[in-house]
Amino acid sequence: MFLKSAYFPGFEFFTKKTCIHNYYPARVLTKLDIKEMELSGITIFYGNNGSGKSTLLNLISEKINASRQTRFFKDEEWVVGPGGGSLHKLFDECVDVINLTLELGENGKPIELPYHRKMITSDDIFKQLDSKKEFNQNVVKKTDEVNKEGKQLLKEGYYYRGMQDFERLRDYNTMRSSPKRYIASKVSSKKAQYSNGETAIRYYMDMIENDGIYLLDEPENCLSPLFQLELRDLILSSQKYCNCQFIIATHSPFFLSLEGAKVYNLDKEPVVSQDWYTLENSVVWYNFFKAYENLFENKEEESLNDLPILTDKEFDELMETLAEMKCTNEFIGIVRGNEEYLSKVFYLLKKYPDLEEMDLRAELGLIH
């Protein structure tokens, strides 16, 4: 871990500076009044839209001079200083008064910031998607142009007066023997395009390297739940084994529940550290799924009542399995005589191969 804590000046500091607390981003810090934050290997800023999550990330990012692919908008309002004699760019001024403390090394001195310091936002992902689409569109356009040029070349024929015409002769022969090869020699290949989620995951995997500080702004954007879990595992592994520190702005329960994460609730005044499962968003999700709990719990039971009839091969396989299990002839006879039982037992043994005859009888309702 590299960063140990962060100090943000609050209401008292800014109200002494001629009402600049009314301007962005000072008004965010004034509202939050967070003072000093202890940082961990994974620190999370939680809050609803407009709570200031991204603002804190941007301030820290600028303070540590983190690289970023997409520039963010700094409010261009300039504030008149005392007596109307000076102008200030407030965002940069707020960055100046933030104080970050570093972890101490074995020698008792603050360690240096790592080389890899990156701010990653959803805008970066969209930019990546757009650039690939634009590149591929240009490839298609160029392909059409080259194809037309090649056809025109065949129509006109070739002439060879000396080495200055060698390239034209070579193109003519290539186009005549293989138009596809001719086009490939003139046009770049398309870049592989993936879904938004796949593109995002690949981007994070490329960007997150060993020994680094990574600030992630709402990484759940563009990611389905499965991809969020994949990124969650990448973050955990990178933090545990690759000496990476993460500061994340999110309201996704998949990231809020990261093991060992310190979560700050920016919706509270003053800001407090809070267990992820007590946060409003987490409780909303819990209550939503709790209301439909019976549907999830009955899913397997319902599926057992609507199974396909076994093929001859599956039937023979099931009979062999029941014989190997040393099931009683009575039970085997009951199962053989009922298509529904055949399918249920076959399905159950595929999913739970350690089941015994009494378990199967209970599942089929033969034990009361």
Image: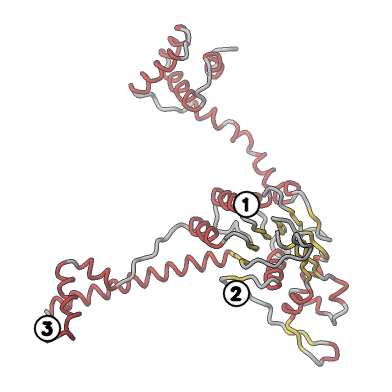
Q: Quadrant of the N terminus?
A: bottom right
Name the mark nearer the viewer: 1 or 3.
1
Q: Which three-letter amino acid code belongs to the residue tagged 1? A: Tyr
Give the numbered dot on residue 160: 3
Q: Which three-letter amino acid code belongs to the residue tagged 2? A: Arg
Which element type, helix, strand or loop, lies under badge 1? Answer: helix
Q: CA distance from mark 1 to mark 3?
A: 64 Å
- Tell me the crowding category of disc 1: few under 14, some 14 to 19, or many 20 or more residues within 10 angstroms, Cα based: few
Residue at (35%, 24%) from the top-left corner? 311
Which element type, helix, strand or loop, lies under badge 2? Answer: loop
Percent of width and height locating residue 255: 65, 52
Percent of width and height locating residue 264: 76, 57
Q: Quadrant of residue 30?
A: bottom right
Reply above or below: 137 against 1: below
Name the mark nearer the viewer: 3 or 2.
3
Q: Which residue is mark 1?
A: 241
Q: Is residue 119 left or right of residue 361?
A: right
- Tell me the crowding category of disc 2: few under 14, some 14 to 19, or many 20 or more residues within 10 angstroms, Cα based: few
Q: Which residue is mark 2?
A: 71
